[in-house]
Image (cartoon, rainbow, N blue to C red):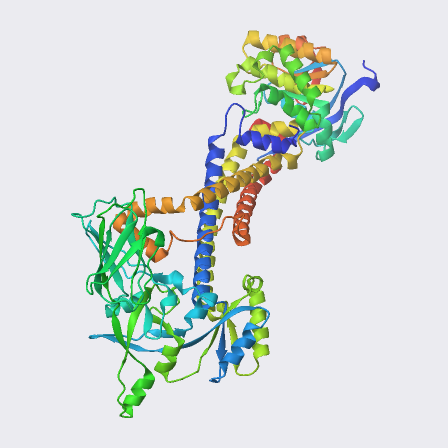
Amino acid sequence: MKLPWPLYLAWKQLFPSQKKVSFFSLLAIVGVALGVNVMIVVIIFMQGFQNKFRNDIIDAQGHGRVIQWKPSSNWQKQQKKIEEYSSIDSVMPYLQGQLLLQKGDYHSIPFSMGIKPDRESLVLDIDSFLTGGAMKMDAHDAEDITPVPTIDTLEDDVIFVSSQVAKRLGVRPPSVIRFYDVNNSRSSVSSTISVSRLDPFVESGEWEVEFKSEQKYRVRDISTGDEIECLLSDGPIDRGIGFPIFKPVIGNEIFRKGDLFKFHVFKGSTVEAFSPSMIEKIKADEMIPPREVRVGGIFEVPWQGFHTEALFSTIRFMQDMRGDEGRIDGFYLRAIKSVASNERELAKSCQALEEFLGDGWGVVPWFVENAWFFDLLKFEEYLMILIMVPIGLVAAFAIAIALMTSVLRKIREIGLLIAMGGGRFSVGAVFCLQGFIIGIMGAVLGCGFALIFMYYRDELMSFIVKNIAGEDGQAGVSQFYDFYSLEIYYPWESVGSFHTFLSFAFFAVLVSTLAGLLPAWRATRLKPADALRGE
Amino acid sequence: MSSSVDIVLEAKGLAKSFLFEGRSFQVLEDIDLSISAGQSMSIRGDSGCGKTTLLNLLARLETGDRGEIRWGNHKMSASSKCASAEALIRASFLGVVYQAYYLIPELNVLENVLIGARLSGSFGKESTTRARELLNRMGVGQKERQVPSKLSGGERQRVAIARALINNPKLILADEPTGNLDERTGAEVMDLLLKSCDEENAALILVTHNPIFAQATNRSLFLKKGTLQNQ
């Protein structure tokens, strides 16, 4: 191939004939690659954390919040107005405040948010934070099969609490345990009966599902003696609110006559709720009994900046508790896709909406409301870069020293090249180009390493964590760092990720090329006659 | 005497001194020299008398105190720094052979020969054919894929001669090309060098300590006290 001779010679000095790669080249390229890999992986994961927080915040708070400065009961009109606004997709009113929860001798004062469950799924995604009210079981013939609740089961006398509140008060939502009657059941465990819904109003009791034939089974409420005959073809049996929904799950083997499944259902915990307005009334010698509510579900705190002690209830419940009938504090918004995906557009849109709504209303986009949190994450990201750039520079110094040594070792060859008609700058370019080639190859390899690390992140992290924290530590690490579920983007999936790859690859090439400049300059300064004498 | 038309190299009034510990040492003084195409010339002299310095001045690898040098039609002042344009001329005008071969260890034999063609910008199919032809002529054609470290001293010098000849140079400057070789190999290499220069119609200036090799050239000179003397 007809390459310019400095490039040809630079390549050959790095990858000599009859050798696949020289030891120096290998070390230099792998060194650059590891540096690029570390820098990319750290920043991609930082961006992954930011994206996760971003999505969690949007799921918990929507794209923005309309705040009502002056209380008004005529908010339905405003809701309609906002819904009709071009950049808004959906709206949900809210009312928030502080409540006191009591269970026996235990208390909690969670941040409380009243929402409209029928509008919630249009604006927020609280379901994604809900967890089951799992009970720790250690038996081979019994297991907790409590289904994860959904926010649509939220009623006026039901609350969903954060896991911290649940732990503090010792409460849980309704739960169900399934027992295999090993004496009676001949069925393979692969076919079973599960519970697909356990609403907050279900009462404690025992249930039995017995197969009369391969297709026919009987559901029996042991406490009342009620029975219902069902067919597998009927699907899940829904007898309305207050009853668990049993759902046959057919595995590899079919059900057989005599297969018996027993269930023990525990009703959800009840707690007493007090509000500041109730306390005011008590002060005025009014007799106000506390409001008894059921725990319908437990949710994990959506993101680190959210209140750790929190509850969700219906807006009506909050209105009752606050004594603000018919009032709301504002609205959560979901913007249309094209606006939501661009923060600048969203900010503009929020400002325009604020002007549109007139005095007494403020509109705050999610990233303004949580700016402190993202500033913190950005600071962390910049700090990481600041820490890592010197690592890159150390690699550059190593390359510079290695190339400088090469110049000194090849001093006579340099003299010869000039004697044979090579220009000084071309001879210098041989060394500069070596730095450039090392940079290019290191950057490509580093990007490759980063992609592999990203692809196998769970396996790699699992291996690392298992060896550092042990089997038990894994759950803690994954819960604390949320590493295993972290959504990260490959460069072809996101512009941000592409820029990160490109920036660090460019940085590596630049720094490696600059590292080659010093030896190149040294080579151009050599006097050919002195070089040939080996001085 | 050669006519001025086919004079390949001409030097007039070349002088060079070195400063050492504040004192000036005159190494070359008013050297006049010319050589025509196809001619060979040897320069002998004691160690440190300035033979290599003279070759470096002629190749414009070093600047002199005064004097003039002419490569074919290209005239230069010996005291001026070598311009980058001269480097390009040098690549096709001059071939150099050194005692220590200076083969590039990362390149194989064929690539080492072709590096001369790459430097002059004439690399291509033709130069590859010529490089193979030269290597065959030098008796190392079978070793074109070998790296220099696998070759003997004599073989390396043969490769270096092939490299010097790759661009059909007008002039070959050889600085003690047999200095690292045993007597028999040295004689073979010298024979090849003289024969090749003759075949290529290239002028040869040979610096050597060996009187027999010096006698084999058309003209034998001796450098003493900074001046060239006929022998």
Up-down relation of residue B138 to residue A187 (above or below): above
Task: Residue B51: give x, y in percent of width and height.
Answer: 64, 21
Task: Residue A423: give x, y in percent of width and height.
Answer: 67, 33
The quarter holding residue A346 reads bottom right
Task: Residue A147: give x, y in percent of width and height.
Answer: 31, 59
Up-down relation of residue A74 to residue A233 (above or below): below
**Nearest to the observer: residue A294 or residue A161:** A294
Q: Residue at x 43, y 75 (%)?
A: A94
A273 relative position to A522: left or right: left
Task: Residue A228: give x, y in percent of width and height.
Answer: 27, 59
View extreme (bottom): residue: A284
Q: Residue at x 47, y 56 (%)?
A: A47
Q: Is residue A214 visible?
A: yes
B3 relative position to B205: left or right: right
The quarter holding residue B206 reads top right
Q: Residue at x 53, y 27 (%)?
A: A16
**Nearest to the observer: residue A472 or residue B111:** A472
